[in-house]
Amino acid sequence: MTKHEIIMNRVINHLGTKYPIIQAPMGWIARSQLASAVSNAGGLGVIETSSGEVEACKKEIQAMSSLTDKPFGVNLPILFLQDDSIVDFVAQCGVKFVTTSAGSPAKYIDRLKSAGLIVYHAVPSLAGAMKAQEAGVDGLVVEGTEGGGFKNPEEIGLHVLIQAIRKKTDLPIIAAGGIADGVGMAAAFASGAEGIQMGTRFVSSKESPVHQNWKDAILTGSESDTYILNKSGSPCLRAIKTDYSKEIYEKGSMDMSVFKGVQDLYFGGDLNAAPALTGQSMGLIEEIKSVEEIINLTVTEFNRTLESLNNSKI
């Protein structure tokens, strides 16, 4: 096996990519600049629609064709879709792979499948996985509590969750949450996954559009430098520890108004303008690298880890 080789599996077959690595659909961040870099490096770039900026997201989807000739995907967060015309638009643009999240995939599964799309649904629990399977999805993005962004308040760790789901279904699994390198990828595969999704690792890439202040916070932070916010309410989420997120954490509740300054955070660098949605894997990230470097290193580490384990048989 060469240093960048991964044997074909069901996730690679569904994605149509060189590697079973996808980029998380982070609001405002997962747009053509970052997504095209991921696709060009052999992974699957994903365009977000959770920002609610439907027309802007449509332009980003269209822009991908001039930035890459490789496959890319789109995320459809069901509860946050303010204009479901995006569902048909995605199919018309030749997209072949979508992830759905934040709600039941049953709402759009027939429209998506009839248009020939592969549909994976993001789930934070075994119950969610069973409902997604019943709805007819092609695969699952299994999200552990370690990841940034919207979370299950039950805080189920990724590897326990993958194993619990794998015992109940044979659907292909993409693992998400706390993965920033090939060691994490190998651990996810050992648990039953056939692909990985990374968010925080790509937020801190050279091609990421976010302000340097956020990238620096990731580089200097540890695995314990995040809060789970609003655990007793909805949405529950994981974010970097800042003065602003500390106030929310100590209050114990929040509403969506906490995101009113999100663009000041993302692009202005004010870490106290909104919660900076970041996973525990920030403690594993020590350097800003290009997307291509991240993916190649991840694959190399993955294969090296598998070889090491093979030589450590009991």
Image: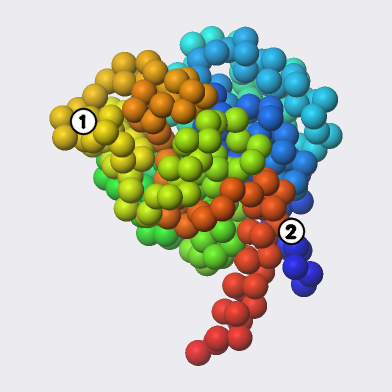
Q: Which residue is mark 2?
A: 8
Q: Name above or below for residue 81 compared with residue 106.
A: above
Q: Which residue is labeled 1 in the image?
A: 247
Residue 282 in view here: yes
Residue at 76% from the left image edge and 37% from the top image edge: 71
Q: Position of residue 201 (x, y in %)?
A: 54, 47
Which one is nearer the viewer's eye here, 117 or 16? Answer: 16
Q: Is 283 left or right of 285, judged from the image as shown?
A: left
- Classify 10 Å Cα crowding around label 1: few (below 14), some (14-19), many (20 and above): some
Q: Secondary structure at mark 1?
A: helix
The residue lying furthest to the left in this view is 251
Position of 90 compared to 238: left or right?
right
- Give neighbour class at mark 2: few <14, some 14-19, many 20+ (Cα, 10 Å): few
Q: Is residue 164 visible?
A: no
For this view, does 143 lie left or right of residue 100?
A: left
Tell me which residue sits at (31%, 40%) in the image.
241
Return the residue nearer the eye: 235 or 180. Answer: 180
> Horizontally, is 134 left or right of 117 in the view?
left
